[in-house]
Amino acid sequence: MSSFYDLVFDIPAEQSFTYQIDDKEKAAVGKRAMVPLGRRDCLGYIIAERENPPDGVKPEALKKIRRVVDDKILFDEKSLELARWMARFYLCSTGQALSAMIPSGRRVIVPVLPDDENEVTVPTLCISDEQADALRAITSKKNDPSQMFYLYGVTGSGKTEVFIRAAQHMLDAGKSVIYLVPEISLTHQTALMIGSRFGSQSATLHSAMTPSARLAEWMRIRKGEAPIVVGPRSAVFAPVPNLGLIIIDEEHDGSYKSGNTPRYHARQIALKRCSQEGAHLVMGSATPSAEAWKLMADGSIKRLNLSRRISGGGMPEIKAVSLAKTDGCLTKELKDEIIKTSQMGKQTILFLNRRGFAHFYQCPDCGWEQSCKRCSVSLTWHKSKGRCICHYCGYSEAPPASCPKCGCVQAGYRGFGTEMIEDEVRRTFPDLMIRRIDADTAGKRGGLEDTLLLFKSGMIDILLGTQMVAKGLNFPGVRLVGVVFADTGLHLPDFRAAERTFSLIVQVAGRAGRYFPDSKVIVQTLRMDDPVITRSCALDVSGFFDAELNQRKALGFPPYSRLIRFTIRSKEEKRAEAAITRLAKLIRPMLPKEADMLGPAECPIGVINTNYRKQLILRSASMGAIHAASEEALLHYEKGKDAKTYLEVDVDPVSML
């Protein structure tokens, strides 16, 4: 029997620590344990066992494992191999990778399973010829496991049914399936659909579950009791046995990229797992990412087209309307269509990707603008809370009665958010039932699911919301979609700004008229001639990507290059400046000729929560050229690191703010 175990921790150090066996002898590779680390007890991951202590270390010098947390093994050698790959690729530690993969619960609770009486394993819907062709391509026995598929189809064309039937095919073959969706709000809807189709064979994993509930599902999945798993980004790590298929729905969505260390992308993890386990990868969207579009054009991904809506609906009529001379948030055209829609007994969705009442407070005389005291951004006025709030750090303060700089009483709030739109809509249409869903309202327990259920049943006339209403949701009664202000994110200092804006408009437009013709989309804008606006209104996906990829190629941005972004943050600007300069000096001589360095420079949002932020971006046509230099430079950087600075490393960043 082994007497010693190696553990890793959720800390930024690629090092294992050896401990003596626990008194109860429950320790095993693949379990977690509480052990002393420094002056405190920490949760560690047991990754290896050994007969003898490390060379030069006396057995009595090693600390003992205090307590083994798990009765049963949580992760196997395959999971450990994936964690080590993540650590190498995303430039983090193995412990940090395992921490992202494994649920944090300490006890297993008994999960509530779907009623087996509701279990239906045979699809009951008829499918179109295009759907049937796509399904045959995905499930063909001639497929090379390395072949990737992309279900590219207009909104409402039946991608979900193809996904579900492909999943059923895998389950019938004795294999498991992971079904990824971008948002928890979509997870709920998709989980209900999967549950009604597969019953107790299905499981759900997402961050809104309690840690204990997630751990219970994790163990059920690991035992093979739930061969189909639904969830957002982190569900890609589900420990399904005999993996046969990973589905990535709404592949374009930025929420598949983690914002915390390790900053992994679920698409890359899915690719790695499929390669590792001989499984197939199928993605889908009406608005693919630029990377996926290029891979389809190159033939690296096989594109499967769905060109028609399948439930009797036609594509909506989309019209751009100028906001330039409008008094308030809603143009006459949009108001008239809301009235017409209500008279027809149909429903309206109003979309604005900005919450709060007003966007910023500004003085017309001296130009003073109310900003966050901790971040370099404007505060947003939230009327319902009576406070001006920062959406980055949460700082809030009362609104000023007059301009603090010059005393002008004409100073006031400019721009609008979802609260202001709700206020105007209620005043304009007092007889209609209106509900708002955004980050402020969705935080209430059950609020989001209840609102979506009421809207789907026709109890709500107008649903107003942020991007939560733009993705994947299927509402039979929606005739009209109003994009209240299409320009919100159009000119952010991020090379993906145009792609995000285009995708959001096309996606939210796709909520209209799925089950009947004569649907309308009104896109309100101040940039009537902007190509992003005109192409999104024309649903011209090919035209948009032709222009966007030509521009990306000329500028040397992804998908024609790979990036690694380093961000230094510190409470002291001079320390942040010194740290990013030192890092740049370490990396520069290590870069090959085909790579270049952008910066060092201040981040587009220079201060968040009193932390000054500086960045450095490495760029090359291939990842190998910049990855090796980054890995080597980080080893030297850590040796002389300033303890009052924090370094974030983002391989293949999605957001540049």
Image (cartoon, rainbow, N blue to C red):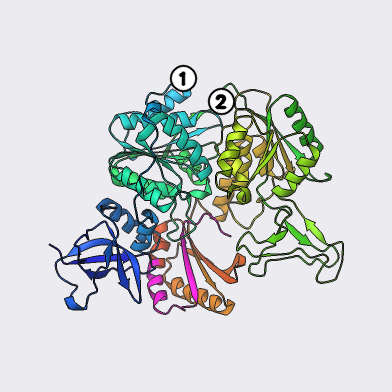
SS type, badge 1:
loop
Residue 147, placed above or below residue 137: below
Classify the position of the N terminus by image quarter: bottom left
Q: Residue at x 59, y 68 (%)?
A: 609
Q: Is residue 656 magenta?
A: yes
Specify which label sits upstream in the sequence, 1 or 2.
1
SS type, badge 2:
loop
Three-letter amino acid code of the residue under disc 1: Cys
Which is more toward the observer, 614 or 197? 197
Give neighbour class at mark 2: few <14, some 14-19, many 20+ (Cα, 10 Å): many
Residue 107, placed above or below residue 481: below
Residue at which label 2 appears:
309
Q: Is residue 142 magenta?
A: no
Residue 517: x %, y % from top left: 65, 23
Q: Which quadrant of the figure has residue 33?
A: bottom left
Residue at which label 1 appears:
126
Q: Nearer the viewer, mark 1 or mark 2?
A: 1
Classify the position of the C terminus by image quarter: bottom right
Left/right of residue 225 with respect to residue 427 in the rendered view: left
What span is in magenta?
631-657
Residue 268, placed above or below residue 17: above
Q: Which quadrant of the figure has residue 195?
A: top left
Q: Residue at x 38, y 53 (%)?
A: 103
